[in-house]
Amino acid sequence: MVTGPVEDPRFVGYRRKLIEDIRSHGVDDLEVLELFDRVPRHLFLPEGVLPRAYEDAPIPIGFGQTASQPSLQAYYLTLLKPTRQEKVLEIGTGSGYLTALLALMADRVYSVERVRELSHRARKSLDSLALRNVALLVGDGTIGWRKYAPFDVMVVSASSPSVPSTLVDQLADGGRMLIPVGSRDSQDLVMVRRTGFAVTEEVVKGECTFVPLLGSFAWRGEAGG
Ligand code: SAH
């Protein structure tokens, strides 16, 4: 575990079980698996769902949103592998759990969330682990975060009808982005890579279901949040 509050020893056992569940989904990268031991997921979830904190499942976090399934997040990290020198842009902070995992791998993580309350809650969780290399922004992540661009790695945790060109524009040379693309009901996980002016897209996993990316360059005309 990273530095943080003293924790209930039961959670250590639950985390070991979660890591076994992630392995059973085919993730065998030890550096990635170890991160799931270091970040206590229960610190990122609301009180009412704590008994489910170490299930390998999407968990509701309020505001109609969910924290993504850990094995899927582990797959993201295995494919993207940000290094200690790299800058990451995350769209959809949500609970902040993936933000924390990314912060342990990368130089700096910039994370945008449209629901203010979720961003504030994530900030408290990240602070409780003394993770200081994370900048959070409340706003529409489909326009990226131009001030800190370009980014070596981009992680989009909500689904889009297409790859927003605004995000591709903020991808560094040699950069890579994972984004679920498709209909509201089902999406393909797409890896976008930029090399110089060349941009390639490759489907790395089919039949995913993410919450929608709501914004100027994704699903539009939504109320509430
Ligand atoms: N990785 C997060 C996933 C949360 S679900 C976790 O595991 O907790 C996806 C999040 O994307 C939601 O919190 C939702 O509010 C947010 N989101 C949707 N559209 C967005 C946009 N345009 N900009 C920023 N965040 C957005």
Image (spheres, rainbow, N blue to C red):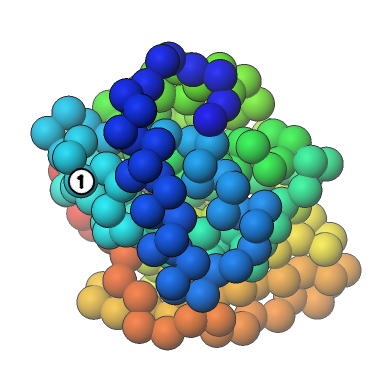
* Closest to the observer, 223 or 176: 176
Secondary element at image label 1: helix
Q: Position of residue 122 (x, y in %)?
A: 39, 29
Along the horizontal axis of the image, is 133 left or right of 24? right
Q: Nearer the viewer, residue 198 or 187?
A: 187
Q: Quadrant of residue 68?
A: bottom left
User: Going 77% across and 48% down the picture, which residue do you hit?
Assistant: 83
Residue at the image position 17 percent from the left and 40 percent from the top: 51
The residue drawn where x is 51% and y is 59% is 74
Q: Is residue 122 above or below residue 4?
A: below
Quadrant housing residue 209: bottom left
**Residue farthest to the left?**
48
Q: Is residue 63 above or below residue 178?
A: above
Q: Which residue is mark 1?
A: 52
Residue 213 percent coordinates (x, y):
36, 58
Circle 1 crowding by C-alpha within 10 Å: few under 14, some 14–19, many from 20: some
Q: Residue furthest right?
A: 196
Q: Amino acid at mark 1?
A: Arg
Mark 1 vs ligand 1: CB under 8 Å? no
Where is 44 relative to 142, above or below?
Answer: above
Residue at the image position 55 percent from the left and 84 percent from the top: 203
- Residue 199 x %, y %: 74, 76
Q: Is residue 137 visible?
A: yes
Residue 119 seen anywhere in this rendered image of the structure: no
Q: Quadrant of the C terminus?
A: top left
Q: Position of residue 171 (x, y in %)?
A: 71, 57
